[in-house]
Amino acid sequence: MNTAEKYARFVTMIAAKQDIGRYRVILDNGHVEGMLLALAQAEGFECLTCKALCGTGSAAFRPIGRAEPLGFDAPGVGRVFRCVACLDGARGGDAR
Ligand SMILES: [Zn+2]
């Protein structure tokens, strides 16, 4: 399988993870937020803010916390991420 085929499979896999659910997100700075997320976001494949796929440059991801599904079972859920572009755009004292 070449790189383009692998990427196409990845995109198809992400496209199948767009069910929206309610999650409790425990941020690394101690904040807890209730958020509506696509499964792909809750599993750490997409930016929590802009839904970009993890990549390089401004699409590079940093972990920001973890998600817990509320009222349903989602076994792949764990660390959640934001891309560097969203983190750099965050103003205020708790960006990191
Ligand atoms: Zn983003």
Image (spheres, rainbow, N blue to C red):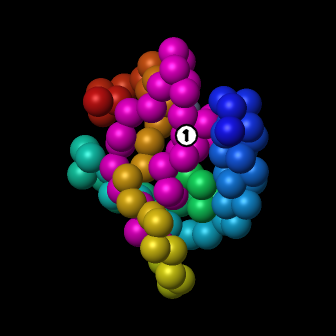
- Magenta segment boundaries in residue numbering: 42-69
Q: x, y (%) of residue 46?
A: 57, 44
46 to the left or right of 13: left
Q: Is residue 23 visible?
A: yes
Q: x, y (%) of residue 53?
A: 61, 36
1 to the left or right of 56: right
User: Label 1 is placed on what type of residue?
Assistant: Cys
Q: x, y (%) of residue 37?
A: 59, 58
- Residue 94 within the magenta-colored segment of the rendering: no
Asked which quadrant contains residue 63, the reply is top left
Placement of 20 over or under 60, stated as above or below: below
The residue where tag 1 is placed is 47
Please report the residue visible at 67 percent of the width from the left and 51 percent of the height from the top: 14
Is disc 1's CB within 8 Å of ligand 1?
A: yes
User: Of residues 52 and 92, which is closer to you in this image?
Assistant: 52
Q: Furthest residue to the top?
A: 57
Q: x, y (%) of residue 54?
A: 54, 34
Q: Quadrant of ligand 1?
A: top right
Circle 1 Cα neighbour tier, 10 Å, few/some/many (<14 / 14–19 / ≥20):
many
* Quadrant location, the C terminus: top left
Placement of 74 over or under 5, stated as above or below: below
Please report the residue visible at 70 percent of the width from the left and 66 percent of the height from the top: 19
User: Of residues 45 and 84, which is closer to you in this image?
Assistant: 45
Placement of 83 over or under 89, stated as above or below: below
